Amino acid sequence: MDKLIGTVTHYFPKIGVAVVKLTDDINDGDQIRIAGIHSNFNQLVSSMQIEHKNITSAKKGQEIGMKVVQQVREGDMIYKVL
C-alpha cells in the first residue's frame, strides 16, 4: 500500500515543476506515484527546491517545488511507493 505524502497545489508547465504541500517527509531518490483524475504515473524524486534553493529532503508541513516528468494538476495526490 502506497503512503500519501502530499498534494499538488500548483503546476508550472513551462518548467515542468509542481508545487507540493507535504503531509509527510520526502527524500531525493524516493519512488513516488502522482495520481489524480487525469494523472497516474510513477517517477523518482530527482529535483526539489524550497524558495529556489536545491534540497535533498523535505519535512511534513513544508511546501516544495518538485520537477515532474509529466503534467500534473492542482489536487493531484503524491504517494510514496513502498
Image (cartoon, helix red, strand yellow):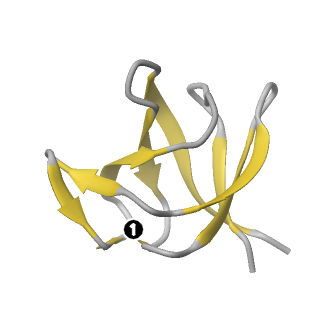
Q: Residue furthest bottom?
A: 82
Q: Residues within 10 Å of mark 1 (few under 14, many from 20)?
A: few
Q: Residue furthest top?
A: 14
Residue 82 locus on image (x, y percent): 75, 80
Residue at figure coordinates x 43%, y 73% from the top left = 28
Mark 1: secondary structure: loop
Query: Residue 1 appears in which quarter of the rendering?
Result: bottom right
Residue 3 locus on image (x, y percent): 70, 70
Q: Amino acid at mark 1?
A: Lys
Name the residue that disc number 1 marks. 60
Please state if 64 lies on the left or on the right of 9 as rendered. left
Against 75, is 54 above or below?
below
Please state if 40 lies on the left or on the right of 73 as rendered. right
Residue at figure coordinates x 55%, y 45% from the top left = 7
Query: Residue 53 appears in which quarter of the rendering?
Result: bottom left
Please state if 11 lies on the left or on the right of 36 as rendered. left
Residue 30 locus on image (x, y percent): 56, 74
